[in-house]
Image (cartoon, rainbow, N blue to C red):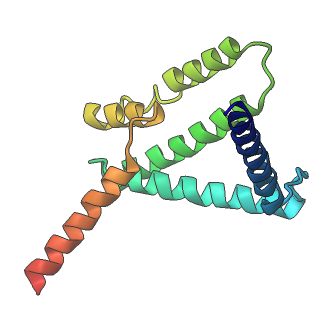
Amino acid sequence: MKNLVILFFALFIGLNIHGQRRRDLTQPIRTNSEPTKQQIEKRDRLMKERREEFITNFMSTLEADEFQKVIIKQHLDSFYEAKLAILKTKFEHRIDREAAVKNLEDTHFVELEELISEGDMKKIKDMIRGGFDEKEFLKEKKKKKRKKKKKRG
């Protein structure tokens, strides 16, 4: 009986090791290489396009007129450029970086407060702190399209 338990235990361990070894052999070998200049440019271009799409979707939620929307768009573009510059800058401590971002969020849109309504300013502040849910906006937009199609057809 003792030999049977030892044999069963050895068989269990052996199959476990064999299974792990086979799993390692089936996965491709990953090599960490530096991205090429083309890959970096492509990623930057895609990020810029995505940011433009995000800002455009956000702008359609505001109740400002076209002139105000153009000014808000320019401020949002400059805000994201400044924030990216801050995030790329080397800081000694994480707290310093967070303070710089907080200062940028608090001071960048001060001159817009006089130009636009309180509701729009609140939406902008909420958006720069990560409160704008683009997926929810796109769902609402899709629902409106469906309702218009139903009314026509």
Q: Position of residue 28 (x, y in %)?
A: 82, 61
Residue 106, x across and y down, in percent: 49, 21
Q: Residue at x 75, y 63 (%)?
A: 42
Name the side, left or right, on which 149 lies relative to 83. Answer: left
Q: Percent x, y for residue 90? A: 81, 24
Query: Which of the two residues, 87 or 66, is positioned nearer the viewer here?
Result: 87
Outermost residue toward the bottom in this view: 153
Query: Which residue is at 54% across, 56% downward?
Result: 52
Residue lying at the far left in this picture: please name it. 151
Q: How many marks?
A: 0
Instruction: Please name whichever residue, 37 or 19, is drawn nearer the observer in this view of the structure.
Output: 19
Please state the horizontal and vertical placement of residue 37, each as a whole percent of the image.
88, 59
The relative height of residue 1 versus residue 105 in the rendered view (above or below) is below
Query: Is the C terminus in the top left, top right, bottom left or bottom right quadrant?
Result: bottom left
Residue drawn at (20%, 66%) of the image: 144
Of residues 108 and 27, the one drawn nearer to the viewer in this rendering: 27
Q: Where's the N terminus, which quadrant? A: top right
Q: Is residue 59 left or right of residue 5?
A: left
The quarter of the picture where residue 22 lies is bottom right
Residue 4, by quadrant, is top right
Residue found 35% across the figure and 56% down from its top: 66
> For this view, does 81 lie left or right of residue 15?
left
> 87 or 18: nearer the eye?
18
Whether 152 is drawn above or below 42: the answer is below
Q: Which picture quadrant has residue 91?
A: top right
Which residue, as the protein is rendered here, is positioned at the far front?
A: 1
